[in-house]
Image: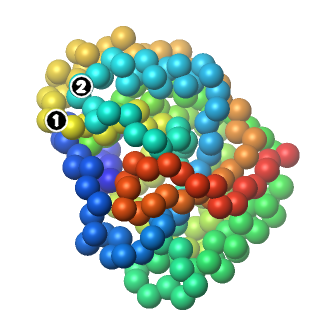
């Protein structure tokens, strides 16, 4: 999924095709990323309310667990061949780098509803902790990314085109919500079946925060 800048930029919101994209995965089975799991009831309620509000503009809810992406890794393999492969040894080194930080648990602020060109999301803010974590990962592997990193909690992918004006009108009740605190106590390396873009995440490794 390609994400552009938030809604200040796009003049229209574009549908996403939920396809297998064989030209992307080229037969490789799993795709991996570092993420922050989400199990806060208040944040999950806001996420569900946002999905309800946008309604039929979104593809039906998939099996993907709610999470915040931290660093997109690529297709794990023993010996990388393609530019979006990542070696299993590199993933192990990233795990060691994160664990070696001995980082303390911290809080994120989950805000209101916003949108990329192809996906609605809840805004995420922090006090620099996410960038510190990303800086520990970046020297070990080039991140697979087509746009600047914007921390966010995905609400859903659009299944039809919508004008920015229409979106603002419908999304208004959840755009300026007071922030909700999300305690971050663990980082997870997760992967998903590359043939199912919104399929469930499988936890491959964990890093507990102090």
- Residue occupied by mark 1: 160
Point out residue 122 in the picture as x, y percentages from the top left corner. 45, 30
| Label 2: element kind | helix
Q: Position of residue 145 (x, y in %)?
A: 40, 62
Left or right of residue 30, residue 170 in this image? left
Q: Looking at the image, which residue is at 25% across and 20% down?
A: 168
Up-down: is 194 above or below 110?
below
Q: Crowdedness of circle 1 by 10 Å Cα count: few (<14), some, many (20+)?
A: some
Viewer-closest of 122 and 15:
15
Q: With respect to residue 93, does 11 lie above or below?
A: above
Q: Secondary structure at mark 1?
A: loop
Which numbered disc covers residue 56? 2
User: Which residue is farthest top?
Assistant: 173
- Could you tell me if residue 70 is visible in this image? no
Instruction: Work out how far the residue at label 2 is from the one at label 1, CA to CA, in angstroms.
Output: 9 Å
Q: Quadrant of residue 174?
A: top left
Residue 18 visible in rendering: yes
Q: Which residue sits at x=26%, y=42%?
A: 118
In terms of sequence position, does the residue under pointer 2 or pointer 1 come before the other? 2
> Residue 156: horizontal and vertical position, in percent?
36, 36
Front residue (pair 10, 81): 81
């Amino acid at each position: 999924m390609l994400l552009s800048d938030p809604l200040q930029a796009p003049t229209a919101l574009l549908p996403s095709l939920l396809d297998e994209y064989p030209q992307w995965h080229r037969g490789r089975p799993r795709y991996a990323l570092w993420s922050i799991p989400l199990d806060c009831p208040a944040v999950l309620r806001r996420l569900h309310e946002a999905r309800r509000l946008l309604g039929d503009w979104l593809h039906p809810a998939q099996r993907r667990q709610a999470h915040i992406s931290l660093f997109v890794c690529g297709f794990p393999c023993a010996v990388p061949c393609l530019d979006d492969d990542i070696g299993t040894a590199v993933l192990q080194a990233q795990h060691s780098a994160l664990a070696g930080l001995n980082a303390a648990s911290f809080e994120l602020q989950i805000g209101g509803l916003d949108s990329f060109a192809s996906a609605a999301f809840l805004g995420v803010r922090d006090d620099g902790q996410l960038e510190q974590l990303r800086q520990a990962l970046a020297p070990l592997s080039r991140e697979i990314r087509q746009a600047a990193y914007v921390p966010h909690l995905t609400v859903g992918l659009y299944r039809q085109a919508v004008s920015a004006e229409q979106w603002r009108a419908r999304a208004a009740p959840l755009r300026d919500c007071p922030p909700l605190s999300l305690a971050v106590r663990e980082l997870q390396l997760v992967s998903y079946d590359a043939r199912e873009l919104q399929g469930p995440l499988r936890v491959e490794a964990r890093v507990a925060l102090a």
